[in-house]
Image (cartoon, rainbow, N blue to C red):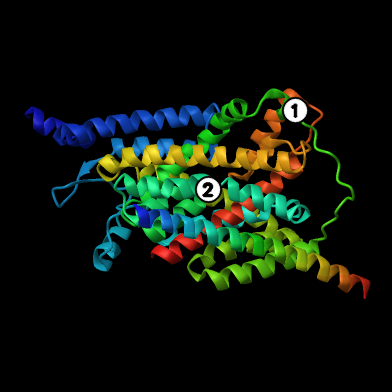
């Protein structure tokens, strides 16, 4: 038995030695990155619900490359590049994650299920109590989306790819997944991975942006109690969900699955159907997040993800989130000046629609300076508006460019 | 490049209009339900 025969017993190592240097280094790098994601997820620096399955999936798929019958390198996880129906039927019976990818991921179902779960967790009462302020801040916090689009085009991306990566500015994972699936089939894997990696960083990065842009005395501003307490009934919230869903579906049918999923979640919550609430906020939301994490990890196979455009996406993704954070804080400052100093500008960061992370970040930053200042209701209003404006922007981009 | 800026501005403009339409919708729902309760 010579060395080649011996190595062919261990095909993961054999294919690593048989690959080009770039792919081999990419595989090793991605295995290490997977380990880092698991570690950071465990430490809760990044979102563990996504990072644990994603990190392990990323490491396993890059380790488990084997020689296929066709003589090419491949895995038994899934093949995202297959579109021919005959080949697809064949691969569905071989690759164990292919059925989940084909039937839930590549048609956007998994994004819609996550969105439905988010809908059940959202209390739109915070938005209905202060609609103008919340929407205004949410629009300001989309600055990253608007600014990144022309920058991405200037960096050589097509309009569709540029729109997909600029949606990262909305800081809404399911939205980026849905938008990139609709707009740039070839790049949706790296775009979604970049989006989810960076969204995990918002929790760690935005507090520094707040400290950089807002002086301590302004961060501690206590919001004045409202002149009259606005009570929003479940009927009002349900009517809002129904009418807004229908109107947005009428305006942007291409994004109707997203709008429907979000407002279905809200409607179920406000209707008080306990069994549905339990199912959607538990098994559906966590099941979808779990499989989303696994699929995002498994899609990071070196030969799929390594391309020069990924480096551009990494730069554009961070720019989009940075500009959105800055835009949100500027929106907070505008409200601060309009209300003659009675509005805490930190609330602006919550316009970035990473629900409820950015609201928590805002409240934490304020509490560090003034523990008696409660901004959470305002922050959640802006946060929920952010989800709606992100969905609107995704709808406009898809309608304009598809 | 110019075309990309005009697309970005279009998206921004439409987002602003639709968002304020949503705000208007919220106000209409709020006052309609208030009137409905009164009647």
The alpha-carbon separation of the residues under discs 1 and 2 comes to 27 Å
Left or right for A49, reference A10: right
Q: Residue at x 57, y 41 (%)?
A: A327
User: A279 or A351, which lies in front?
Assistant: A351
Q: Which residue is mark 2?
A: A170
Quadrant occupied by the C terminus of chain B? bottom right
Which type of secondary structure does the marked residue at label 1 adopt? loop
Answer above or below: position of A261 versus A385.
Answer: below
Q: Residue at x 72, y 39 (%)?
A: A336
User: A19 or A139, which lies in front?
Assistant: A139
What chain letter is assigned to the residue under label 1?
Answer: A
Answer above or below: position of B19 versus A133.
Answer: below
Residue A246 in picture, x, y percent from top left: 62, 71
Callout 1 crowding tier (Cα within 10 Å): few <14, some 14–19, many ≥20: many
Q: Which residue is mark 1?
A: A220
Number of on-image labels: 2
């Amino acid at each position: 038995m010579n060395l080649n025969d011996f190595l062919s017993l261990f095909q993961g190592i054999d294919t690593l030695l048989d690959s080009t240097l770039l792919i081999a280094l990419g595989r090793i790098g991605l295995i290490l990155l997977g380990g880092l994601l698991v570690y950071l997820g465990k430490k809760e620096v990044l979102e563990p619900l996504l990072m644990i399955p994603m990190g392990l999936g990323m490491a396993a798929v890059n380790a488990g490359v084997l020689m296929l019958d066709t003589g090419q390198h491949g895995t038994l996880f899934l093949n995202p590049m297959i579109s021919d129906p005959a080949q697809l039927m064949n691969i569905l019976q071989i690759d164990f994650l292919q059925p989940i990818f084909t039937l839930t991921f590549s048609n956007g179902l998994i994004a819609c299920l996550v969105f439905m779960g988010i809908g059940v967790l959202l209390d739109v009462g915070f938005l209905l109590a202060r609609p103008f302020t919340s929407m205004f801040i949410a629009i300001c916090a989309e600055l990253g989306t608007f600014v990144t689009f022309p920058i991405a085009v200037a960096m050589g991306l097509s309009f569709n790819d540029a729109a997909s990566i600029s949606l990262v500015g909305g800081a809404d994972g399911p939205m980026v997944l849905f938008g990139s699936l609709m707009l740039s089939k070839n790049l949706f894997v790296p775009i979604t991975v970049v989006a989810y990696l960076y969204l995990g960083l918002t929790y760690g990065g935005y507090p520094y942006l707040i400290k950089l842009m807002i002086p301590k005395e302004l961060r501690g501003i206590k919001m004045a109690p409202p002149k009259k307490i606005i009570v929003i009934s479940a009927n009002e919230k349900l009517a809002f969900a129904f009418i807004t869903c229908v109107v947005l579906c009428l305006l942007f049918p291409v994004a109707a699955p997203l709008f429907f999923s979000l407002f279905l979640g809200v409607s179920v919550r406000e209707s008080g159907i306990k069994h549905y609430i339990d199912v959607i906020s538990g098994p559906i939301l966590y099941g979808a997040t779990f499989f989303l994490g696994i699929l995002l990890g498994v899609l990071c196979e070196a030969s799929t993800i390594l391309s020069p455009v990924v480096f551009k996406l990494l730069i554009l993704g961070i720019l989009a989130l940075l500009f959105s954070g800055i835009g949100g804080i500027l929106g907070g400052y505008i409200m601060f000046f309009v209300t003659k100093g009675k509005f805490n500008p930190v609330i602006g960061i919550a316009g970035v629609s990473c629900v409820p992370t950015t609201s928590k970040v805002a409240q934490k930053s304020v509490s560090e300076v003034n523990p008696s200042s409660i901004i959470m209701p305002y922050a959640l209003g802006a946060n929920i508006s952010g989800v709606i404006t992100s969905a609107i922007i995704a709808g406009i981009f898809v309608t304009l460019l598809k | 490049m110019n075309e990309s800026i005009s697309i970005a501005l279009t998206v921004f403009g439409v987002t602003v209009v639709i968002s304020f339409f949503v705000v208007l919708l919220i106000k209409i729902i709020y006052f309609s339900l208030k009137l409905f309760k009164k009647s």
